Amino acid sequence: MSVPGFPTQTWTGDESGGPSAALIQGPVRISGAVLGAGASWHVARDRLGWTTVVLIARPQRCEVLGVDAIVRACADRCVDPLTTAHMLARRCGGMDPAETGVLRIGPRGQLVELLNVSLPAMIHWDPRQGIAPFEPVAVATGYPPDGTVTEMVRLAPGAVLFAATRGVLPHEAGWQELNELVSSLAIDRFGGQIADVPPNELARLVRSSWTLGDGPAGTIAVGQPPALVQAA
């Protein structure tokens, strides 16, 4: 949708609903799923063609509209994920901080700048290299510490970035649980195609394939379908 006063397009997904189809940025697809209250995902495309994607598990005082306004304002200013993370921490930090992950996708889609602030799971799955996790930098506070830097990823055909909140995977989960999640959701089989499904279908996949835990449950998938699928 167009937002008056902001040269951006924005989309939001929470327990009340979300986009009707996967979003498109060049060859890259973006989808997300929310399975209950307290989690949401937000997408804002700025005037330079970059797309910011935020997955957040919110404390009660931090409302969806407040997060939306921050994501829109950051997209309007074309800032990097670290600046967006700081702005969200000011709004949703404190004794019970939000869980947050921020990605910024380049205009052509393949280049992604990202920061896992406090999510228990943010991974890059590549059909050649397998799983590469990005550790959270500020689980206890939600504020990125001094010296924090973002990561840069180039999405190859078939690759996907996948992130989840603690209702999907707890913070104490290790490599075994992470590999089980990847296998259960068939990320290791379908790769970037998992991001090319509507949010309601992604939610059904997570519910039917994985046992959810306590806390807000939300996921995002940013991926590039395999080259043969794109050609078709």
Image (cartoon, rainbow, N blue to C red):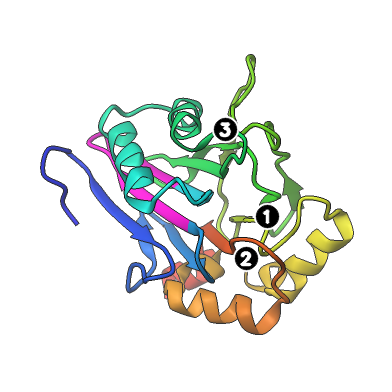
Which range is magenta? 40-53
Give the residue pinned by disc 2. 191
Between the C-alphas of marks 1 and 3, the distance is 36 Å
Q: Earlier in the sequence, mark 3 or mark 2?
A: 3
Q: What residue is rendered at 51% in x and 41% in y?
A: 102
Residue 143 image position (x, y, % from top left): 59, 28
Q: Nearer the viewer, residue 140 or 129?
A: 140
Q: Residue furthest left?
A: 4
Q: What residue is rendered at 41% in x and 56% in y?
A: 27
Residue 138 image position (x, y, % from top left): 67, 32
Give the residue pinned by disc 1. 126
Mark 3 neighbour density, 10 Å: few (under 14) some (14–19) many (20 or more): some
Q: Residue furthest bottom?
A: 208
Q: Nearer the viewer, residue 120 or 59?
A: 59
Question: Are the residues flagged by discs 1 and 2 in contact, CB closer than 8 Å?
Answer: yes
Three-letter code, disc 2 = Gly
Q: Is residue 129 visible?
A: no
Three-letter code, disc 1 = Asp
Q: State the mark number for residue 94.
A: 3
Residue 31 image position (x, y, % from top left): 45, 64
Mark 2 neighbour density, 10 Å: few (under 14) some (14–19) many (20 or more): many
> What secondary structure is found at the residue carrying circle 3?
loop
> What secondary structure is found at the residue carrying circle 2?
helix
